[in-house]
Structure formats: structure tokens, C-alpha cells
Amino acid sequence: MSKITLISPVDGSVYAERPVLPPAQAKAVVARARAAQAAWAALPLETRIARVMAGIDALEAMADEIVPELAWQMGRPVRYGGEFGGVRERAAYMAGIAPDALADQVVEDSARFTRVLAREAQGVVFVIAPWNYPYLTAVNTLVPALIAGNAVVLKHASQTLLAGERLATAFHKAGVPEDVFVNVVLDHATTEALISGRCFDFVNFTGSVGGGRAIERAAAGTFTGTGLELGGKDPGYLRADGDLDAAVDGLMDGAMFNSGQCCCGIERIYVHDSLYDTFVEKAVAWVQGQRLGNPLDADTTMGPMAHKRFAAIVRDQIADALAKGARALIDPGAFVADDGGAYLAPQVLVDVTHDMAVMREESFGPVVGIMPVRDDAEAIALMNDCAYGLTASIWTADAQAARAIGAQLQTGTVLMNRCDYLDPALCWTGCKDTGRGTALSTLGYHALTRVKSYHLKKA
């Protein structure tokens, strides 16, 4: 029987191994989920909400074990305490809006007709979660899917195998039936076979563009709904009227937090030329204040990247940029933990152009290129010069200007004076190669349910 092996970025050791579920057994698991879904959906909404939120409570109760476990699995420093603040915020918000989001829309209720738009669960929702925020990203779909009455099958990334097990343990303890929420370990072939075999009613995938294309190919002709959050190359723009110090702190944290491994992390920065030199100087000082090292050390602010092959991509982009004329402002030797493998020193690049991969292709690591711009028009053109569109961050004192700039940007979310944040009240979505679909907000519930129309003639 084949296995999935999790190599810890902390020391390169085998941290966990799990057997892959054979195709026949995987199909049987999904069939049991489908059989169990109707009874779950028949429970009162308030019962489903209570059990899901009890699952969040049970997950939080494991924090002392989960936080170091995350460090071992994907390298995030223990000083940041896991993902529980965001998990609670998103779950509580989605639970709070569920009664209104899932309520019938009554078009007419007269002596002659009752006309209603109702929402019902899709059925079985397949969640394929990534490793970079293994709890937050899973919760985005898991919580509203269960609340809406779906059964959920979760496949977690190989780099965070234990996260799916923790989620399953927590929700089962809270009263979500084991067949209603199932954690599985699958290989790519079985995953694609289940999707192409029409085993699911909706598939949510967060990961690479290549992975998204594989999901779409597998789902082709099945009419299975998909939600795909794929790559990103999110820009930040500091206008001439922006708060420079706040922008440095916000944008550099957005670029370097989690070793740059954030879906909506800042990967390129454009600064009005009147502020450019000072911004760069302060950005370099900010990065030099970081401490790269063992994520289990409370003083570490940056741990290793999740895998040495991810770090190799970033190193190659930096080398390509330097060969094309960019300048590196950070001496990697100042970060003694940089081992040429998973531990990678943060880097700030200037004299960059859009002929360089580091300014147009996803890095997903602790590197950022900074360019001066003359005005809004140039910044907009550069921010749009990319295959991706997840978020864009604008730093300005003028909200009307931010809205006007945002209207011209090809992106899913426009943020002003902040970055690297997901607001559960707003729709999480993207465009271009970032993918398609909607998560969180009322629209997130719409993606996880289907509409049923009732036209009842009484006389």
C-alpha cells in the first residue's frame, strides 16, 4: 500500500506517514457520506450551527498540541500561536449570518400563489485544502458547508497531513457524525477519479494553477460545481499621500509573514517616486530586524519554508532577477540559519522590471521587489500586468481615490491601508489565473447550496 510522507522543514526528518486510501475504499467512504447527508440536513439549522461551533471549541482546546505540530509540519513559528483567532472569527461570522443567508426568499404569499426561492444543500462537498494555512483555509468551506446541511469530505495537503485529522477529531467530538465529515488521504489519481466519477456535488480547491487545471479537467462533463483559489502575485501601492511608516510596517509584514507563504501575501510593491528612497531604506531596516531560525524557538520571527523545493523556486527567481540587473539589498549571510535548503533568508530587490519572473510569477516566499512609479496610472498598469488577481493593497489618505483605483484593477479584493487580510463579511474571490468561485460572506453560502424554486398555485 502506498503512503504519503510528510518531511518536516524544521530538520528534514520524516514527521508523519499515512497510507493512501485505495480507490474502492475511497469510493465507499464517499458513498457513506452521501447516505448520511440527508439526516444531517434534516436537523434544525440551530442544531447544525451549535455542533459546528462546538467543533471550533474542541479544536481550540487542542491549541497547545496543534501550535508546535504546525511548526513541525510547515514551519510557522510557535510565537504566532497558530491560526485560532482567524478560525474563530470566520466560523463565528458564518454561523451568525446563516439564518438569513439560508432563509427562503418569499416572492409572493397571497390567496392565489406562494412563490418561493429556497436554498438546499449541494449534497457532498469535497474540500482539498492547502498547507500554508491548513486550518483557516479548510474552515472557509468546511464551516458553511456543514451548517448548510452538506456532508464534507476533506483531503488535506501532504505537508499538513495531521491538520485534517485534528479537524475530524474536533468535529466528531462535537457531534458531527463521522460519515458527515470525513478526512481522507488520497493520491492524485484517486482524487481525479472520484471527481470524474461524479462522486461529489461541489469541489473546493485551494492550491496551484496546475492543480486547478487538473480539477477542471477531472470535472469536465460532470457538471460538478467548482470553487478554485489558485495562484497570486498580490501588489501593494503607496501613493504620495499615504502614511509611509504605516505602509512599511504593513506591506513588509504582508510580504514576509509566514515566510511569504500567504495566499494574499504582498509579492510586489510600487511606491510613488517622492517616497521611494525612504520607503526602501525603511523596508530594508524592517527586514534586517527579522530573526530566521527554528520555528520552535519563541524568539524566531521567520521559520523555514514548508519544503526545500519551495525555497528553491524563490532562490531561482532571485538569481534570475540579479542576472537581469536587479540589486539585492539584504545580505543573506546576515541570516546564519539560511542553509541553502528550506531555511531561506528574506530578500528585498530593487532595480526590478516586469521582464523578471520575480515581478510577474508567483514566488510564495520571503522576497519582494520594489519599483518607483510616477502616478496612479503607472501603478495601475503595473499592478494589472500579471496573470493573477486575488487582492491589491492601496495605501492612501483618500478613500475616494482608493475606490477609483480599485475600480480599474483586475483583482478580487481591494484593500486600503492594510493587506494580507480576509474579511469574512466580504466575498473571497479572484479573477484571471487566480481562479473562480466565491467563499465566505452570504455568497459563500450560495456556492454551497442550490436554488429550488416553488410556484404553488392555490386557486
Image (cartoon, helix red, strand yellow):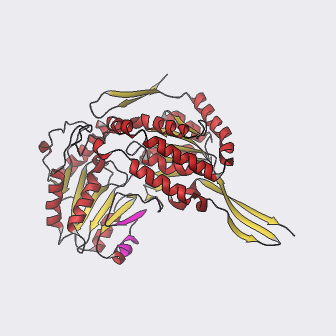
Q: Is residue 232 visible?
A: yes
Q: Is residue 225 visible?
A: no
Q: Residue furthest top?
A: 1
Q: Which residues are magenta?
A: 402-429
- Magenta part mainly helix, strand or loop? loop
Q: Is residue 261 above or below residue 28?
A: below
- Disc count in the image? 0
Quadrant into which the C terminus falls = bottom right
Identity of the residue drawn at 23% across and 46% down: 301
When asked about the image quadrant of residue 371, the answer is: bottom left
Identity of the residue drawn at 21% across and 52% down: 321
Instruction: Classify residue 52 as left or right of residue 360.
Output: right
When asked about the image quadrant of residue 11, the answer is: top left
Q: Is residue 238 above or below residue 429?
A: below
Residue 324 at x, y percent in the picture: 19, 53
Residue 261 at x, y percent in the picture: 32, 47
Residue 312 at x, y percent in the picture: 27, 40
Residue 363 at x, y percent in the picture: 30, 49
Identity of the residue drawn at 39% across and 42% down: 131
Front residue of 56 and 214: 56
Question: Was residue 172 drawn as part of the magenta stretch in this picture?
Answer: no
Instruction: Classify residue 337 as left or right of residue 210.
Output: left
Question: Was residue 422 drawn as part of the magenta stretch in this picture?
Answer: yes
Q: Is residue 98 above or below residue 54?
A: below
When asked about the image quadrant of residue 278, the answer is: bottom left
Instruction: Classify residue 104 as left or right of residue 7.
Output: right
